Image: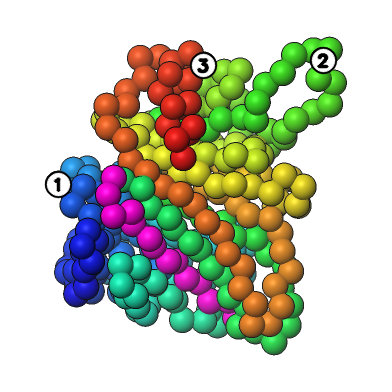
Amino acid sequence: MTSTASIHIDKTSWAGWPNCYRISNGEVEMIVTADIGPRVMRFGYVGGQNLFWVQKETEGKSGEPAWVARGGHRIWVGPEDIRYTYPPDNSEIQVDLKGDVLIATQPVENETRIQKQIEIHLAPTGTGATVIHRLINQGNMPLRYAAWALSMMAPGGHGVTGFPPRGTHPEMLQPTNPLIMWAFSDLSDPRWTFTRKYLVLRSEPGNTTPTKLAHHNPKTFGAYFLNGEMFLKQYDAAPREEHPDMGSSYETFTNADFLEMETLGPLTQVEPGGTLEHVERWSLHRNMTPSAWTDDELDRILLPVLASK
């Protein structure tokens, strides 16, 4: 469909959806379908594994009357609320190509009068991408909400997030960050690993007990390790602005099927016609298999990558 010297965007069919767009720089590729969404359904190395989970039972389908888990990466309205969070995204969307930039825009939701949009900038070389999420208030009254970007990761890996810089007592007497639980959070669940610097959640396919935790870090990141590869998403959170869910900038959840890495922006009053933006930076990395889930080993792998972004 369109290309620059390094970025190629082609219309294709994928996983049963006939109207998909493949964005590639020759090293990595992303798939966005115009048949549902807006969602990024694939991100991976060319010819390699899809780091995102895709629900097999709903591949290629559309038009369902209720919200479907579906898979991939999506944008939601936070905090979680049946009316504002769960309108279905099962209908056709508009995809616009502006040079090597793809913009996927959902019709205005009847339930909320909010319009969702994802804009993708893939780097011309390497594995980096900038993903801009927009929530547009197309109603006639102000709304207060947060942008919530959720990546549903393929099963069997480990999701890692880091806390703000640690300190010592009594030099640091004030709290530095929240650790947030849900009623179904269980700190004794063996899928969790807690270190001084990091929180690790293991995806265990078939384990039907959901679990979830959240925290706040001005330099929010989530890393997912699967089969020797690492997907990294980063978001710069505003430390002094009110975030949903008791101050969360990052949430992670798992169930029998997938592991979710989620970033949240601040709660914002959006006037009629106004737009709330939320930006994540993505990258993929090879030969990334920690020998242990410890601070030293995760520092060895993550600190050089985080310092370069």
**Which is in the foreground here, disc 1 or disc 2?**
2
Q: Residues within 10 Å of mark 1 (few under 14, many from 20)?
A: few
Q: Amino acid at mark 2?
A: Glu
Quarter containing the N terminus: bottom left
User: Which kind of residue does numbered mark 3 sit on?
Assistant: Asp
Residue holding disc 3: 295
Mark 3 vs mark 2: in front:
2
Q: Earlier in the sequence, mark 1 or mark 2?
A: 1
Is disc 3 surrounded by few (<14), some (14 to 19) or many (20+) residues within 10 Å? some
Name the residue located 48 percent from the left edge and 33 percent from the top edge: 306
Q: Position of residue 127 (x, y in %)?
A: 31, 45
Question: Which percent across, then down, holds residue 269?
Answer: 74, 69
Q: Which residues are magenta?
A: 112-126
Q: Earlier in the sequence, mark 3 or mark 2?
A: 2
Amino acid at the residue labelled 1: Gly
Residue 193 position, x and y percent, is: 52, 21
Residue displayed at 68% across by 33% down: 179
User: In whole angstroms, how far apart are the C-alphas of marks 3 and 1?
Assistant: 32 Å
Question: Can I make out residue 167 in this image?
Answer: yes
Question: On residue 47, which mark appears?
Answer: 1
The residue pinned by badge 2 equals: 171
